Amino acid sequence: MSRKLEVSLAQMDLAPLAPAHNGERLVEIATAEAKAGAGLIVFPELCNTGYVEPLAPGGGFSSGCATHAEYAERLHAASADQDDALIQSLSAIADRHATHIVAGLALRSATQSGVLYNASLLLGPGGLRACYAKAHLWHNEKLYFTPGRSMPVSDIQTARLGMQICYDIRFPEITRCLTLQGAEVITNVWASFRRADEPIEDEGLFHHRAFTRAQENGVFFLSCNRVGQQGDMRFMGRSLVARPDGRILAALDHEKEGVLRTTLDLDEVARYRMSTGILNDRRPEIYAPLAQRTPLP
């Protein structure tokens, strides 16, 4: 009997430092998708706060802040605790409809005051199932967030799921480590942007990246990016799902809001891995000494 998983990727606009407004939209979308039968609902990076400012080094604050210190204080106030009302609401939806939700959130440390994480949370029946803190922080994210050190993999319905965030995709070790822990489905939540007054350099950018990570590991790769404009930057959308052999199963090839819905045939994972030997043919004993070397100055 084949294993199927209905997935919904929510490509949405977000307001800077407006967790109540953004949270209402997440709950609305999650409720609708859960009622429609989605077994996994995915939201973009930093859904509660919007992306950090300045978006690019040397840029300004579209949120009205005058300094990094002021922005940091407001970002901390807008971030979530693990018992936050939004997390409770999304968990209740997951409970009620026997579904799972992945949401990118700015999250306060449960043990250290003033420490924030750029996190991806997995919520399911019973509440918080896993929390991944972004390991590779991009540019100005380093001003506000502490990098994570763990890569959890969790059971959801008929699959095992791992999470990563945006810039992590450029480090193949993350996807491989999740795969070696049994992940068959990997979510990457993004807040990837370009200058609003310039065209996108590569229309296939997200296809290329997802194709590579999917086919070199034999996983379904779910890439969920946000849309909208923040200051002089525009978020690029183009959310998609890549199959274990890298082929694109479904995509939103635009920068508008929308929900990408598709069905994963999870038996494709074993078929691809068995036909290629992609995991059996690995030679970790010869990689390890080289991978541990520090680049020379």
Image (spheres, grey):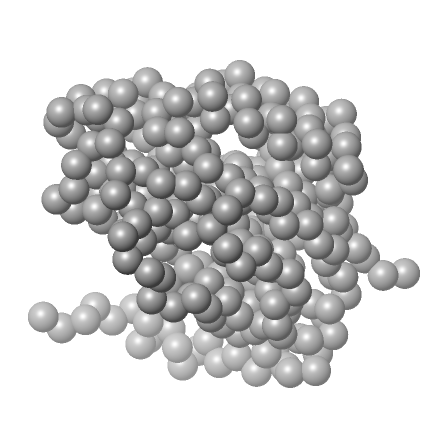
The foreground one among 39 and 258 is: 258
Residue at 52% x, 79% y is 282
- Which of the 4 quarters of the picture holds residue 61? top left
Query: In this rendering, is residue 83 above or below 246?
Result: above
Location of the N terminus (image quadrant): bottom right
Whether residue 127 is visible here, answered yes or no, is: no
Q: Is residue 157 left or right of residue 116?
A: right
Residue at 66% x, 75% y is 273
x and y percentages locating residue 7 in the rendered image: 69, 48
Q: Is residue 138 left or right of residue 4?
A: left
The foreground one among 266 and 154 is: 266
Location of the C terminus (image quadrant): bottom left
The foreground one among 46 and 133 is: 46
Residue farthest along the left direction in this orientation? 297
The foreground one among 59 and 242 is: 59
Residue farthest along the right direction in this orientation? 1
Q: Is residue 27 left or right of residue 144?
A: right
x and y percentages locating residue 166 in the rendered image: 41, 52
Residue at 58% x, 72% y is 246
x and y percentages locating residue 163 in the rendered image: 52, 49
Query: In this rendering, is residue 267 above or below 159?
Result: below
x and y percentages locating residue 57 in the rendered image: 16, 46
- Which of the 4 quarters of the picture holds residue 60? top left
The mark total stands at 0
Whether residue 92 is visible here, answered yes or no, is: yes
Query: In this rendering, is residue 200 above or below 75?
Result: below
Residue farthest along the front direction in this orientation? 197
Residue at 44% x, 78% y is 285
